Image: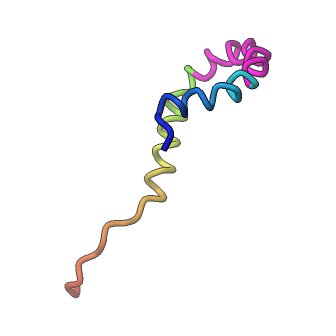
Amino acid sequence: MPTPVALRFAALPQALLLLPYALLHLPHALLLLPYALLHFPKLYFCCLTLCFSYAPLPARSASPG
């Protein structure tokens, strides 16, 4: 079984391939950062609501009434 270090180095070529793409979109990301931080609480609570809305409901007791 490969060691974690070997796995880390195995992913290096893919990371290097993505580097030019990341640098190309860095200005856009920086421009969107203030907007994202401004709306982060709204997005965070929206995600929490979605996560908990799909959570399984607690089991009901078998007693009648």
Q: Is residue 12 magenta?
A: no
Q: Residue furthest front?
A: 1
**Horizontally, is 38 left or right of 30 in the view?**
left
4, above or below 34, in the image? below
- Residue at the spot x=55%, y=35% of the render? 43
**Horizontally, is 6 left or right of 19 in the view?**
left
- Residue at the spot x=20%, y=85% of the render? 63
* Quarter of the rendering containing residue 56: bottom left
Q: Position of residue 54 (x, y in %)?
A: 48, 59
Instruction: Determine the main secondary structure of the stretch shown in magenta.
Output: helix
Q: Position of residue 49 (x, y in %)?
A: 47, 47
Q: Position of residue 34 (x, y in %)?
A: 61, 15
- Residue at the spot x=63%, y=17% of the render? 33
Q: Is residue 22 magenta?
A: yes
53, above or below 24, in the image? below
The span shown in magenta is 18-36
Q: Residue furthest bottom?
A: 64
In-front residue for pair 25/13: 13
**Horizontally, is 4 left or right of 23 in the view?**
left
* Quarter of the rendering containing residue 20: top right
46, above or below 31, in the image? below
- Residue at the spot x=49%, y=35% of the render? 44
